[in-house]
Image (spheres, rainbow, N blue to C red):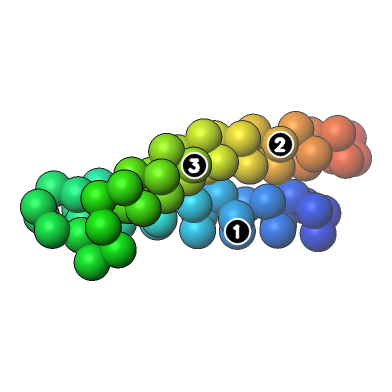
Amino acid sequence: MTLKSGVLLGLSCIAAIAAVGSVFELSSGAPPLGTLTTSIILALSVPATGICFYVAVQDTKANQDW
């Protein structure tokens, strides 16, 4: 694993936590940051999770020594 893929995996984890937290906040009915802000966080963090994870895996594959 390279530094780049490690950082990307970390970002993927943080984005996934933000997405799950946003879902829970929205389902509670009264998110502290407001519905609009929490929805924006959710809308940005879901694709960010997938993209960061995908790029991290591709970077690791490209730098693997066989």
How packed is label 2: few (under 14 Cα within 10 Å), some, or many (20 or more)? some
Q: Is residue 30 above or below residue 36?
A: below
User: Dot 2 corresponds to which residue?
Assistant: 55
Q: Amino acid at mark 3?
A: Leu
Sequence-wise first label, 2 or 1 = 1
The percent position of residue 34, horizontal first and vertical second, equals: 26, 57
* In front of the other: 47 or 26: 26
Q: Amino acid at mark 1?
A: Gly
Q: How many marks?
A: 3
Q: Residue at x 63, y 42 (%)?
A: 52
**Tag 3 and tag 1, C-beta contact below 8 Å:** no
Q: Residue at x 60, y 55 (%)?
A: 11
Q: Residue at x 88, y 40 (%)?
A: 63
* In front of the other: 50 or 1: 50
How packed is label 3: few (under 14 Cα within 10 Å), some, or many (20 or more)? some
The residues tagged by marks 3 and 1 sit, at their Cα atoms, a distance apart of: 16 Å
The percent position of residue 44, horizontal first and vertical second, equals: 49, 42
User: Dot 3 corresponds to which residue?
Assistant: 44
SS at circle 2: helix
User: Dot 1 corresponds to which residue?
Assistant: 10
Horizontal relation, residue 28 to residue 41: left or right? left
Report which quarter residue 60 is drawn in.
top right
Q: Which mark is residue 30?
A: none
The residues tagged by marks 2 and 3 sit, at their Cα atoms, a distance apart of: 17 Å
Q: Amino acid at mark 2?
A: Val
Horizontal relation, residue 47 to residue 1: left or right? left
Q: Residue furthest bottom?
A: 32
* In front of the other: 66 or 64: 64
Sequence-wise first label, 2 or 3 = 3
Report which quarter residue 32 is drawn in.
bottom left
Q: Residue at x 68, y 51 (%)?
A: 8
